[in-house]
Image (spheres, coloured by chain):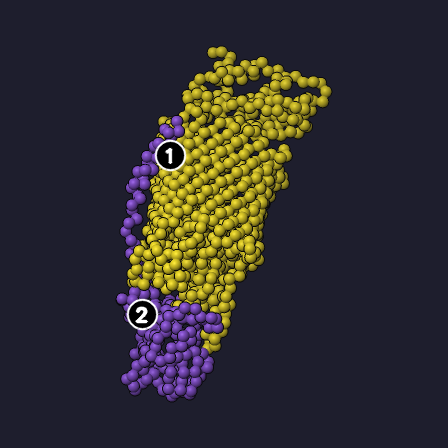
């Protein structure tokens, strides 16, 4: 055995990921250089220093045993397990380095030295031959090379494993939740929600009637091990019609070896007396096969506010997901099935009749109906189910290209139950079944400096609104087809500079059949513009058939550069065209919890938004921060607002209709992380946003007020497995809101009085304090166990949230204590 | 090379278009609104007489103090002021038996009376008449043949109206669904959701 073989024999055990089938010429050269290396320096002024870190270009993981060769002095050093190396006692101010690693392209770079230089260097894996392939599929690619993407750490994700995706995302600055009571939360990014925020799971956008203000995402975030978010339309590969932002849930590919691993979490809560259990298992084989099974069960009873019980706010959830695949290095296929089912109780007191009932509820400081604690979910409630089946195939070829094809089928059923009379008591008032077929195919080329990705997509979606509900359809039946293409390119010529460009074009055809009541038809004078589309008349209603076509082009562009040594600046522009969603065009019904009637506008056009985002980031050192101001302008921006009152025998109901305006939304997010000493770290996350109509300067509705979450984390390095966090979240009162208040007339105690219906004024500012304790992981038989104890709203503060549509009826949740036991197998 | 990448997906696309393009041919059924109360009638009979006057209260109500827009007629056998309250004229110092009937008229070919359904669910419903102070000496009480719920509370579907002196004023009739209380002196004592709110003027001559 030659000396070369011996040395390589020493080094290979430190690189378990890489299999050496053949020693390349490169590695021989590297080793020879090592043998010949000598170091010497000039006698005077040799105190310059470089501390470097070598990372993988794709996912920032450290590269150990990389070779750093200083060309000027023939000196060679190696990176340790953390990818760190130090070059000391350097004499010349500018040195030329060659950084290399097995299976990687060499990096030649010049560095300017001073007494304390520190730098990061990025290496790109390179496939030298078909036999020497590095498994990078298990690591996730960056969502965008220029737009900031926020990742939830595993701890952050698991903490909310029993509370739903939106609540987990709320930890990120700039993300709020729009709620309908405690059981229903939807993510809102920079003031935009609903169809303006896309949720992508396994590469497909979830189709679950996301337009609804009281429609929470029907997805179990525990089925995914990576959750990332981009605030803005920065990922055109997945979606082009979500100007608010995009949430990407993905699973890492298991490694090609024999292993069985998993995680189980048990959560218990005092408020709601709830319990949830999540477990996931992955089995992988050395021939590349793998399968993963995961399940979640959640049960909770009525929640309580500080002074009273919130009757009928219990909920249940049962989810299961299963995926199976084969990873053959050069090609992969995967199939996935998942089932999501939830039953959510809606605060009983929120079901009102007309506007006078609403005033009574607003004026009561307690909910009008308070019953003893119960796990049983009664009316009003929602029962939502979401089924997914998908199959995916990828193939890599030798010219750095990868082809990917995916088909997925989603079936979503949403049943919303009101408080009804007689035979209709047990029938839902809304029963929608949405079937969506997606077929996408894309090709990706990648080299060390650049990557291109282009694809086509095709979608067919069918919505069936069951007429058997005994009440008129809230949204009509429709068939929607989408066809389009996208192209994204990113260029990173050096570690200090990167730029990206992308566009996405989608052609959309909506085939709708809708019934209009004759009375409404006459009031709106639809005969003029829609008369030609009437195909039938029955039961004092007209059946209208329309085919609405939208062509939307979205694009984005951005740059990212290092302006100072530790400061990175990125500037991104997102231009998005979004077709109006089905509710914005064809909504037709009463919202019982708000005593309002909502009507769609069939004449809406696509809305266009331009968003400019600046990002200043410093991610090195004891003080790290991220400051991101943004500015969004919208044309044909679709909003909903009251247009009048409709009187019927049932009383008065304000009517809300959709309208297109020119809008401006601007704000900033600021996060920082300050390590005070080895025990204490301060974290802060704040966001401020304002939105208004450009012409009249009227504020937009439901814009979140300023919030700031600040926490101090305490940990003792000796007891690595214990940490404690005390945090405070302050939410100010939103003083920029549209005034949609009106008066109603009422007979009270024999006298006719006029009452103000105040549905606009936001609630007061509030503070919430919480404490978290974390122990672990500790060895537990052959597994690892961690325990967390979390106290929310420690002082049992009584408060209302402007973004809660049911804020008129009751306070938010009071104190809650959660115990979580997590076992890693 | 480009062909080989895109040809398979394009073939599959065509297959999809073929299979699904023609699936939206059937017209959706119209939805019947089965629980909407669209008409309330009051049948007023003077005690001792056999003459009954029926007052209809239909879908469109109106606002107090604002301009009125489109209206459906509120027809009754007496006055019909567009945009104003229905007037019920009663004689002074008399008693009247009043029977309330509730209808779902959303399907004009099949007007369904819902009163039996509401009487059957007497526990979950309550009728209440709010009388303004101007109508001094006027009172509405439960009739002897009124329905009672399982706790003995009268439903007020059949009532007796008693007049004394000459006066006039507003009365509002309500039906509450799942009220939190079955008794009270003003609307807010009852809680629950308002199923209808009919307003009329009582003129006592």
Question: From what the image shows, is residue A747 above or below residue A785?
Answer: below
Q: Residues within 10 Å of mark 1 (few under 14, many from 20)?
A: many
Is the C terminus of chain A in the top left, top right, bottom left or bottom right quadrant? Answer: top left
The x, y position of residue A454, in whole percent, is 43, 34
Q: Which chain is yellow?
A: A
Count of marks overlaid on the render: 2
The residue located at (29%, 56%) in the rendering is: B29
The residue located at (37%, 56%) in the rendering is: A530
Q: CA distance from mark 1 to mark 2?
A: 58 Å
SS class of the residue under badge 2? strand
Whether residue A447 appears in this view of the structure is yes
Chain at tag 2: B
Q: Nearer the viewer, residue A583 or A164?
A: A583
Q: Viewed as shown, does residue A197 lie left or right of B37? A: right
The x, y position of residue A563, in whole percent, is 62, 35
Residue under disc 1 on the same chain as residue under disc 2: no
SS class of the residue under badge 1? strand
Q: Nearer the viewer, residue A350 or A780?
A: A350
Outermost right residue: A44
Name the residue tied to disc 1: A405
Q: Nearer the viewer, residue A128 or A436?
A: A436
Question: From what the image shows, is residue A351 above or below residue B68?
Answer: above
The residue located at (51%, 68%) in the rendering is: A756
Which mark is on residue B103?
Answer: 2
The x, y position of residue A60, in whole percent, is 52, 32
Q: Residues within 10 Å of mark 2 (few under 14, many from 20)?
A: some
Q: Which chain is purple?
A: B
The x, y position of residue B106, in whole percent, is 32, 65
Question: From what the image shows, is residue B167 above or below residue A735?
Answer: below
Chain at tag 1: A
Contact, CB < 8 Å: mark 1 with mark 2?
no
């Amino acid at each position: 055995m030659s000396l070369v073989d011996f040395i390589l024999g020493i080094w290979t055990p430190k690189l378990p990921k890489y299999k050496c089938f053949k020693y390349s010429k490169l590695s021989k050269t590297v080793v020879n250089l090592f043998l010949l290396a000598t170091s010497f320096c000039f006698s005077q002024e040799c105190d310059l220093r470089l501390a470097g870190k070598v990372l993988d270009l794709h996912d920032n993981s450290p590269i150990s045993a990389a070779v750093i060769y200083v060309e000027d002095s023939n000196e060679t050093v190696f990176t340790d397990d953390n990818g760190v190396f130090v070059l000391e006692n350097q004499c010349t101010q500018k040195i030329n380095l060659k950084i290399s690693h097995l299976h990687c392209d060499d990096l030649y770079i010049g560095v300017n030295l001073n007494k304390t230089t520190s730098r990061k260097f990025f290496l790109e894996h390179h496939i030298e031959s078909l036999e020497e392939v590095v498994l990078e599929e298990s690591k996730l690619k960056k969502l965008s090379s220029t737009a900031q993407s926020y990742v939830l750490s595993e701890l952050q994700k698991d903490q909310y494993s029993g509370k739903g995706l939106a609540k987990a995302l709320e930890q990120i600055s700039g993300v709020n939740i729009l709620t309908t009571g405690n059981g229903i939360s939807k993510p809102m990014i920079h003031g935009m929600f609903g169809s303006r925020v896309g949720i992508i799971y396994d590469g497909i956008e979830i189709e679950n009637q996301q337009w609804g203000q009281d429609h929470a995402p029907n997805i179990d975030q525990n089925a995914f091990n990576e959750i990332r978010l981009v605030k803005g339309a920065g990922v055109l590969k997945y979606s082009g019609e979500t100007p608010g932002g995009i949430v990407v849930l993905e699973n890492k590919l298991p490694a090609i070896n024999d292993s069985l691993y998993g995680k189980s979490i048990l959560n218990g809560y005092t408020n709601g007396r709830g319990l949830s259990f999540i477990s996931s298992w992955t089995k992988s084989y050395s021939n590349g096969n793998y399968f993963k099974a995961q399940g979640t069960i959640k049960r909770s009873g009525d929640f309580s506010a500080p002074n009273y019980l919130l009757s009928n706010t219990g909920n249940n959830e049962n989810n299961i997901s299963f995926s199976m695949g084969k990873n053959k290095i050069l090609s992969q296929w995967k199939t996935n099935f998942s089932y999501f089912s939830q039953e959510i109780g809606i605060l009983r007191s929120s079901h009102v009749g007309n506007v006078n009932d609403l005033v009574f509820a607003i004026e009561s400081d307690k909910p009008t109906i308070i019953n003893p604690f119960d796990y049983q979910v009664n009316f009003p409630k929602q029962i939502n189910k979401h089924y997914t089946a998908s199959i995916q195939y990828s193939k890599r070829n030798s010219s750095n290209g990868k082809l990917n094809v995916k088909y997925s089928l989603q079936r979503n059923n949403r049943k919303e139950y009101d408080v009804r009379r007689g035979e209709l008591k047990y029938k839902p008032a809304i029963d929608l079944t949405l079937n969506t077929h997606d077929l996408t195919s894309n090709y990706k080329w990648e080299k060390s400096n650049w990557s291109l990705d282009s694809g086509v997509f095709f979608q067919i979606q069918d919505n069936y609104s069951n007429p058997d509900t005994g009440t008129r359809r809230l949204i009509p039946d429709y068939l929607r087809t989408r066809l389009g293409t996208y192209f994204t390119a990113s260029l990173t010529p050096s570690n200090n500079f990167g730029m990206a460009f992308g566009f996405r074009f989608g052609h959309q055809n909506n085939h709708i059949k809708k019934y209009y009541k004759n009375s409404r038809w006459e009031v709106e004078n639809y005969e003029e513009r829609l008369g030609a589309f009437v195909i039938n008349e029955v039961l004092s209603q007209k059946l209208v058939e329309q085919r609405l076509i939208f062509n939307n082009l979205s694009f984005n562009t951005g740059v990212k550069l290092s302006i100072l040594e530790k400061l990175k600046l990125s500037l991104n522009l997102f231009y998005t065209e979004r077709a109006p969603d089905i509710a914005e065009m064809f909504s037709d019904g009463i919202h019982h919890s708000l005593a309002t009637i909502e009507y769609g506008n069939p004449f809406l056009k696509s809305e266009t938004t331009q968003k400019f985002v600046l990002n200043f980031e410093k991610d090195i050192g004891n003080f790290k921060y991220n400051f991101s101001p943004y500015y969004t302008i919208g044309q044909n921006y679709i909003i909903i607002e009251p247009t009048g009152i409709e009187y019927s025998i049932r009383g008065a109901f304000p009517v809300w209709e959709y309208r297109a305006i020119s809008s401006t939304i601007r704000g900033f997010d600021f996060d920082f992380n300050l390590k005070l000493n080895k025990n204490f770290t301060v974290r802060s996350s704040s966001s401020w946003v304002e939105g208004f109509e450009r012409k009249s300067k009227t504020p937009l509705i439901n814009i979140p007020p300023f919030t700031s979450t600040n926490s101090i984390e305490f940990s003792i390095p000796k007891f690595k497995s214990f940490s404690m966090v005390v945090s405070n979240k302050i939410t100010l009162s939103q003083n920029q809101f549209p005034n949609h208040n009106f008066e109603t007339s009422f007979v009270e105690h024999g006298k006719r009085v006029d009452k103000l219906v105040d549905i606009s004024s936001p609630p007061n500012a509030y503070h919430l304090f919480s404490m978290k304790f974390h122990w672990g992981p500790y060895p537990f038989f052959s597994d690892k166990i961690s325990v967390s104890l979390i106290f929310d709203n420690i002082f049992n503060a009584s408060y209302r949230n402007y973004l809660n549509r049911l804020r008129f009826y009751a306070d938010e949740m009071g104190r809650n204590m959660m115990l979580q036991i997590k076992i890693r197998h | 090379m480009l062909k080989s990448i895109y040809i398979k997906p394009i073939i599959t696309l065509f297959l999809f278009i073929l299979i699904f393009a023609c699936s939206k041919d059937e017209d959706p059924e119209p939805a019947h609104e089965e629980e909407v109360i669209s008409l309330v009638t009051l049948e007023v009979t003077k005690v001792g007489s056999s003459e009954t006057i029926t007052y209809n209260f239909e879908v469109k109500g109106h606002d107090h103090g604002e301009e009125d827009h489109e209206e459906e007629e509120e027809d009754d056998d007496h006055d019909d002021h567009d945009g104003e309250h229905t007037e019920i004229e009663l004689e002074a110092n008399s008693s009247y038996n009043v029977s309330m009937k509730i209808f779902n008229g959303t399907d004009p070919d099949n007007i369904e009376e819902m009163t039996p359904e509401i009487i059957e669910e007497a526990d979950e419903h309550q009728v209440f008449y709010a009388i303004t102070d101007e109508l001094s000496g006027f009172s509405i009480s439960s009739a002897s043949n009124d329905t009672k719920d399982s706790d003995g509370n009268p439903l007020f579907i059949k009532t007796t109206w008693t007049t004394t002196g000459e006066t006039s004023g507003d009365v509002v009739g309500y039906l509450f669904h799942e009220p939190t209380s079955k008794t009270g002196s003003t609307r807010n004592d009852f809680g629950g959701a308002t199923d209808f709110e009919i307003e009329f003027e009582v003129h006592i001559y």
